[in-house]
Image (cartoon, rainbow, N blue to C red):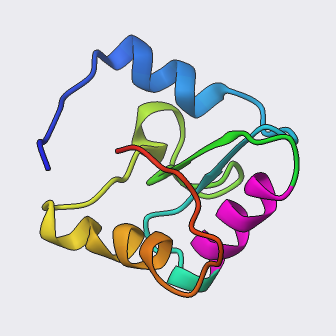
Amino acid sequence: MERRTIPASDALALIEREESHFWDHKSAQSKGTVIQKIAAGLANSDGGEFIVGIEDKGKQAVGLDRWQGYGSIEDATIVLEALARDIEPPVPYSI
């Protein structure tokens, strides 16, 4: 897995994008079961995308500070593990 950096303007666009039936975001603190539920829900409907690492609106963080992410690639394995286990049929995903 490769670590990528995106421009602040792209990060802000993702942070400010409104949640919908096709787009969602979750905190980096989300449990694996929450990630599985979102992935399965999107897979069982018309599809969509979600990102893990953006704090919800209304928390203390605002703007780019809502982008929390993970401290290391190893810390992000909770997302991969959640997507790779206990979901049948498997859902396609990209990192």
Looking at the picture, how far across and down is residue 75, in whole percent?
A: 21, 72
- Based on the displayed image, in which of its 4 quarters is residue 87 positioned? bottom right
Closer to the camera, 72 or 36? Answer: 36
Closer to the camera, 23 or 86? Answer: 86
Q: Residue furthest front?
A: 89
* Residue 74 vertical placement versus 22 (above, below): below
- In the image, which residues are magenta? 34-44
Please name the residue shown 42% across and 16% down the image.
Answer: 10
Q: Main secondary structure of the magenta part?
A: helix
**In the displayed structure, does residue 65 sit left or right of residue 60?**
left
Residue 43 part of the magenta segment: yes
- Based on the displayed image, in which of its 4 quarters is residue 80 positioned? bottom left
Please name the residue shown 76% across and 53% down the image.
Answer: 42
Please name the residue shown 41% across and 12% down the image.
Answer: 9
* Residue 87 vertical placement versus 20 (above, below): below
Please name the residue shown 37% across and 78% down the image.
Answer: 81
Looking at the picture, how far across and down is residue 49, in whole percent?
A: 63, 40
